[in-house]
Amino acid sequence: MKNPQINKRSLGVSFDKLGVAHVTLWAPLAKEVAVLIGNEKSELALQAGEYGYWTLSTDKLKPGDTYTFSLNGEKERPDPASLAQPDSVHGPSKAVDITAFSWTDAKWANPKLDDYIFYELHIGTFTAEGTFEAAIDKLDHLVELGVTAVEIMPVAQFPGDRNWGYDGVLPYAVQNTYGGAEGLMRLVDACHAKGLAVVLDVVYNHLGPEGNYFNDFGAYFTDKYHTPWGNAINFDDAWCDAVRLYYIENALMWFRDFHIDALRMDAVHAIKDLSPVHILKEIKQHVNRLIAETGRQHHLIAELDLNDPVYINTLEEHGYGIDGQWIDEFHHALRVTAGEPQTGYYSDFNGIEHLAKAYRDAYVYDGIYSPHRQKVFGVKAEKNTGNQFVVFSQNHDQVGNRMLGERTSTLVSFEMQKLMAAAVMVSPYMPMLFMGEEWGETNPFQYFISHTDKELVEAVRKGRREEFKAFHAEGETPDPQAEETFNRSKLQWDLLFQSKHQTMFAFYKELIKVRKQHPALKYLNRSDLNVDYNKEKNTLLLQRRHGDEKVCCAMNFSDQQQNIALPAGPQWVQLLNSANQQWGGNASEVTPGVVEPESIIIYINHYV
């Protein structure tokens, strides 16, 4: 089989120092393969090699040239490993010299995961322009906020110019309407110059439907398994070696050639692989080789819905070695505690009791019966550290997969918004914000597409309507194909000039500052933690420690003032009270343990 290349691309089109193009295509069933260059479609034949690979070295294909592959003289297709698609997923690929970019980040050092404070954003709706270049202009805002890692939703080429990114069909190509490969490189370079790490969301569990020509080249899919998106990607069936190589090299490319710091891998529970070495484990092994060769640190983070720590256990512990994972259960427990109706998947969560369990155990369902799933679910994550879990009160899924895409700001009070944000920030896990939440953005984030296949568009519309039956939502589901659905989802940066939103932004800045400055909150030690709750009062007391420093977080999720007894011992001093007037609240009481409705007080022992 063909082995992954650590130091350079081995698939698609790449250029050496002399400007010679090296072309490699996997098409095991083809009898003839040629590359067609430019509008004239100048034809150059590829040579058949081992394991179904076809190759060519030529000086006739230059950076900037468009090209396609001809299969048996019958089908003309874009390159599966294309780096650029100037005319969308159906048009020709464009040759890119990925080594030509002039990086300025030689002194950049990727932070440890402990120091990651994530900020998830969607390039198309983060700014009015919806481009990488426009995002660069907003980086000073993120620096002022205090986040340390920018997490970008998928940028792999998708149909049209409006999409969440999970319908991408060319995993190596960077969306042309965002600014392409060079635009992404410029954004990464600018982030590093500002001290921000960059996390890229990648999709290795499926490919989108429109523009998906992979079956014309080889067995990229298998009917052994099925996913919510159709046949699974072929990671363990006949011809799977080349498919595994394709995704391994994709991960390496983002790290090596685009200087990405971490990958967030979408829904890895939907990756079907019974190989002796799971594809995620093999990706991790090759990423470790890259780290050893370059000296640059890179992280892998999974979205996972299995509550199975084998994914995040180390290679030495016979796990897959993924560095961290999202945990939706913290979000679900927090939202039910804050008043979210217990419908759909929220029906599994009872509020404050499960929130306390999420603080203690990471997984809520860790070997207990799940009524929603109607089975015992999950195992305990006792040996896993806090820097292996990402928590949040909002993200693209949890906002955008509501029928109307409502943000927290339109669902709960101003005071509850602050409390929910603080509940995330004081956790012993890595916190994540969703773009705009730091000023209480009121525009929704709705699901949008721009497919050209009318039958596919109607199927998506029908699917969205079916999806919300469990939530008993009222009203009409927004049309995902309509441009106004996309435009409605853009951030309103001018809200930052309004007093109420300025106050929310200032509160978020203070929250992040407090987390960074105090070791008891900054260091993610799950063992130095206690949590108590009162179900009747809907209150929770979180205690965290580091060395001699102790912090108490008294949270009141009820609509009444509550007394929360503080631990005996040190004299407790307020670090932050979300109900104070400077944060838009009405608190005047300074009695220790008296917590205003829907608010949090963070205390520290007076010895520090």
Image (cartoon, grey):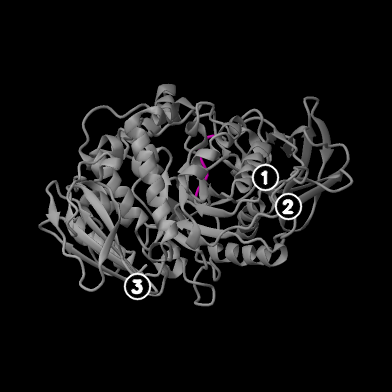
The residue that mark 1 highlights is 81
Q: Are the two marked residues, 1 and 2, in contact with CB atoms closer than 8 angstroms?
A: yes
Q: Give the range drawn in magenta.
A: 206-210
In the drawing, does residue 503 fall left or right of residue 140? Answer: left
Marks 1, 3: nearer the viewer: 3
Q: What element carries label 1?
A: loop
The residue that mark 2 highlights is 9
Q: CA gap, disc 1 to disc 3?
A: 47 Å
Q: Residue at x 34, y 73 (%)?
A: 528
Q: Which SS type dominates the magenta stretch?
A: loop
Could you say which quadrant of the image residue 251 lies in? bottom right
Residue 360 at least partly seen: yes
> Mark 1 is on which residue type?
Ala
The residue that mark 3 highlights is 528
Q: Residue at x 53, y 52 (%)?
A: 204
Q: In which quarter of the image is the N terminus?
A: bottom right
Could you say which quadrant of the image residue 243 lies in? bottom right
